Image (cartoon, grey):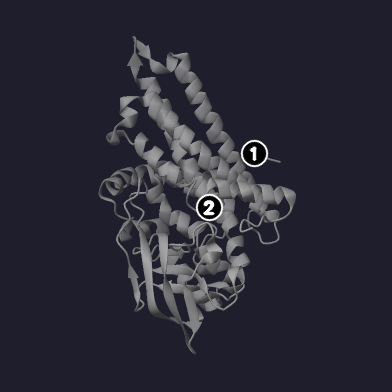
Amino acid sequence: MDFQLTEEQRALQDAARTFARSELPDLAREMEEKDFSVPADMMRRYGEMGFLGVNLPTEYGGLGLGHLEALLVLEEFAQVSNAVAFPVFEALVGPVRAIERFGSEQMKARVIPEVTAGEATVAVSMSEPDAGTALTDLKTRAVDAGDHFLLNGNKRWTSGAGHAKYYVTYCRLSDDEGAKGIGAVLVEKGMAGVSFGAREELMGFRGIETRDILLDDVRVPKENLVVPAGSFGKLMSAFGLERCGNATQALGVAAGALEQALAYTQERKAFGKPIVDFQAVQIKLAEMAMKVEAARLLIWRAAANAAHQPNQLPSVFESSVAKCFANEIVRDVASLGVQVMGGYGYHKAYGMEQRLRDGFAWGIAGGTTDVQKTNIAAAMIGRRFDQRR
């Protein structure tokens, strides 16, 4: 057991940190203010630097490294903001993994090089108005129509909707009830019958487009089948890595809050001395640090141990523990950051209140903290719980 990063991992981490902190803070502030996605020219910069292909295969333009290396890069971007980190999240731990793992060779060769080059993003379209946590209640349906599927439905809470080029869309591909009828197809933004709802106004996540997707008799070519009906379990297996990415986005916010609070409390003076000299402030900083360090180690454990799993993905238990813990501590750490900065922490110009708003979302997205706890209990006991009865 070794808790040290290798020289190569540190070099990658340093490269990501240097790029993120020199190139992205001004962009992040503008994205927060004006609520737009990472521009195309910056996406290509991400691609040129290799940040969109860290753990993707070299034959598709990736670096061919491991999941831990991918999460090291993601954290550095997330410390600046979740919005500038979101394309990295989508590429390294998000729906691209479903394509890389389950898609045809033709699909992989067509889509993944675009992603690693920063020319396209892939979003996942899962939730519906009546199917969120109870995802197997989804109603979007793809009917076999010979050389294509005819797709109809309404998707909700799709992060990246309207901005992404491709959408891994969960849908019913057979008449079987529940999970047995569910598979996924790859929908492309420009297909006839694909339209998007108004941009959602959220508490945080500015710079990350969230919209409904309306699917009206969309002709999806047969070659765009990601997985057939009955593959719901396969799709969800890829979520072990997504959970680690979600946790890392939360960790980045918390780590950034801690760093900002440390700097502020050494500069800000009260009663003639820096406020860090007061024991009450020291205790808050220590609490923040303990939570950040523990979250990071849980995420790294899940990523490192994935190499020992049959599917090379983080286990449900370890990824759920990491996600749930990071989702909860980011709210505490960002709140403490606001508190130690006082009025400046509450002021929009200084960014700490943004961390609080953005951080809260990760315990909702990708499976709520309560869902993670049922996953954890199920993994410990060795059986799934039927929430319907």
Q: Position of residue 108 (x, y in %)?
A: 52, 72
Is residue 5 in sight in this rendering? no
Tags 1 and 2 touching, CB below 8 Å? no
Q: Is residue 134 left or right of residue 116?
A: right
- Quadrant of res 229: bottom right
Graded by Cα atoms within 10 Å as few (under 14), some (14 to 19) or many (20 or more), the crowding at tag 1 reads few
Which disc is residue 52 wearing? none
Mark 1 or mark 2, whichever is nearer to me: 2
Q: Which residue is mark 1?
A: 3
| Image vertical order of residue 295 relative to residue 191, above or below | above
Q: Nearer the viewer, residue 238 or 307?
A: 238
Graded by Cα atoms within 10 Å as few (under 14), some (14 to 19) or many (20 or more), the crowding at tag 2 reads some
Say which residue appears at 33% left-offset and 43% top-offset: 25
Q: Which amino acid is tagged 2?
A: Gly
Say which residue appears at 47% left-offset and 33% top-offset: 333
Q: Which amino acid is tagged 1?
A: Phe
- Quadrant of res 191: bottom left
Q: Nearer the viewer, residue 2 or 286?
A: 286
Q: Secondary structure at mark 2?
A: loop
| Image vertical order of residue 290 relative to residue 372, above or below | above
Say which residue appears at 34% left-offset and 46% top-offset: 23
Say which residue appears at 44% left-offset and 65% top-offset: 122
Quarter holding the N terminus?
top right
Q: Secondary structure at mark 1?
A: loop
Q: Nearer the viewer, residue 248 or 333?
A: 333
Q: Which residue is mark 2?
A: 367
